[in-house]
Image: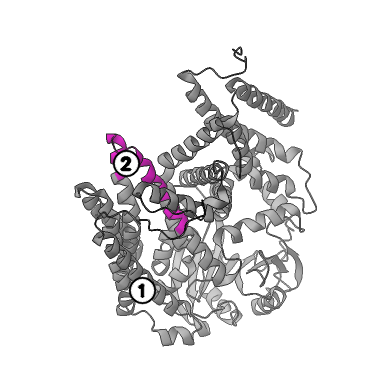
Amino acid sequence: MAAAKPSTVRPGRLAPWLRALLAGPCAFGLTALIIAVMPFWVPKGSGGVDHIAFPLFFMPAIWAVIFFYAVLDRSLGRVAMVMTAIAVVHLVSLRGILFG
Amino acid sequence: MINLKARETRTLVAVHGWAGAVLGLLLYAVIVTGTAAVFANEIKLWSGGLLGTSEPLNQPLNAVLLQLEAQTPEQFREDLSVRAAPSGNVWAFFHTDEIVDGARRERGILYTIGPGGKILSRAEGLGDELAANDPFTALGRFYVDLHVRLHLPNPWGLIVTGILGLAMLVAAVSGILMHRHLFRDIFVLRGRSRLVGLRDLHSVAGTWTLPHAFVLAFTGAYLSFAIAVGLPMLAKIAFKGDVRAMVTTLNGLPVVDPRPAPSGNLDDVLADARRRADAPLLFAGWENRGRADSRITVFPAPRSGDLSASRLIYNGATGELIRERPIVGTEPSLGASLVGLIGPVHFGNFAGWWSRAVWFALGAASAFVTWSGLNLWVRRRADQRGWRALGRVTAWVGGGLPFAMAAAAMAYFLSLPSLTSVFWTPVAFLIAAALALVPALTMRSIERVPPLLFGATGILLLTLPLLRAAVGGPGWGAALAAGQGAVPAMDFLIVLGGIACVLSAVTALRSREPATFGAGSFMQSAE
């Protein structure tokens, strides 16, 4: 019999709620963070507005990618780690941008 | 077609189902009102009864505007906006900016100018309030406001409809991913069992409308969240709260030169703009009139074959063209092109009547997909009391919403002669919604509720063209002579819609086991 993989999600009462938390409010929050930092790395383009237009235009797509990843990845722990890592990187960037 | 593991498919089915179960009724409301809003301008023109011209800004206006300026208090002469009203008249709004409750708003005098420069009305106040209180566009605006923000106050209404857009996106994407045989299944309609038949109808209609649903969900979520959340957030972070700096980035740096200067001739500017745009003009905004830094920004409709239009900026003192610019930014760019696509693709107005007719049909199909999905959900859980209650609510909303919208139109016409349509249109909607609750709560067979309400909707629709004429609306001859073919077209389509509603209701109510939009065997795939 194969040993249980450490990354396999163990069925539990909390798991669906935690996944809903990650795919719901956390996905919204992470999307907002990503959108907030995008103007500082997206090139301004020939019209000088791409750094504003791109985050706004891709907002639904960014959210959808995060949502479906949070829903479909088998490992709840991995979802949490990946989302946390992306959030930390963006928070650090934002802190540097806003406060120097 | 798309091979996913069983676990992923089960997850997607659950996500698809729960997104629909939790948000499906509100989403249905947004889709149905959005389908009507595709023809919002035609509804305003048809219901308003004021026959203007087909291109209101393509007529001499300068002389009449000078007369109106002389009658306008001096504090409101700073800025002027001239708009092609849905009725075919011109709305001329002399105004100035003022801060009300911390927000910049426009206050002034609004004149309605008919063909030949005839002044039809005059009103004073804040621009957005004047527009909201116009009795002749109350019906079209009611449907649009219901779609855009469910008549909830800003920004909450936009946030709710934004979330619904994301829910529709989730349903569309999960719908694609969870279908093993996507292209084969779009031709499968098995009619033997009601539940299976409804599932196949849901699946077939959903698959056929998938591209449209995806695009509308994406653009709808953008339109809601960009205004309510995105722009304010970017202003705070990217521009450190400096909204003026953000506006300058998006629209270009304004020149400041307060020296007095004579005003240019608006007719010359509009004629030049019409020639350059090769399309009807929609709006012209004239700022800092009487100053050397005066600017006239003209917004034309897109050229035939184009998806979006450039804005034309003129020197308001000399009438010379300064530059053309895209919807955002000062030069064409990929970002401006993407943002410029959102409107035409969402509203379906990129190819005139034809694209809007297709958008209307696909919208109606999407409404069916949403509603049939909810029905499937509750029928599978018919043994559970809570879900049975949702079944009654689904029947009420499914049939009650179109009924209430038709009742709102009826009340609009009845109240138009007394100019109280702004009040009675939404009130009638609520009264009709409450009336529709009666059969939904009292009838034993829930499945007979929607066809009953659809039949009632059809009867109301059939009365609308008669009501329109009875309250003094223009006849077909007068409308066609003014170039407003939308009036007879709308009368015809509404009668057709009414007949369709009545016939489908009679068919559904007569059948022995009324299955809501019951499936018959239309096509079978080779299995």
First in sequence, mark 1 or 2: give its number.
Answer: 2
Q: Is residue A28 left or right of residue B203?
A: right
Residue B140 drawn in magenta:
no
* Whole-percent x, y for residue B388 in the image: 29, 40
- In this rendered view, identify the residue nearer to me: B474 or B70: B474
Quadrant of the snapshot with the N terminus of chain B: top right
* Whole-percent x, y for residue B79 in the image: 60, 65
Q: Is residue B134 left or right of residue B231?
A: left
Give the magenta-colored segment's residue range.
Answer: B365-391
Q: Is residue B252 visible?
A: yes
Q: Amino acid at mark 2?
A: Leu
Q: Chain of mark 2?
A: B
* Whole-percent x, y for residue B174 in the image: 54, 41
At 35% from the left and 49% from the top, the residue drawn is B193
Residue identified by numbered label 1: B495
Residue identified by numbered label 2: B390
Residue B376 drawn in magenta:
yes
Q: Residues within 10 Å of mark 1 (few under 14, many from 20)?
A: some
Residue lying at the far right of the rendered structure: A46
Q: Is residue B112 above or below residue B198?
A: below
- In this rendered view, identify the residue nearer to me: B282 or B458: B458
Q: Is residue A7 above or below residue B374?
A: above
Check disc 1 and report its element: helix, strand or loop. helix
Check disc 2 and report its element: helix, strand or loop. helix
- In this rendered view, identify the residue nearer to me: A35 or B119: A35
**Which quarter of the figure has residue B137?**
bottom left
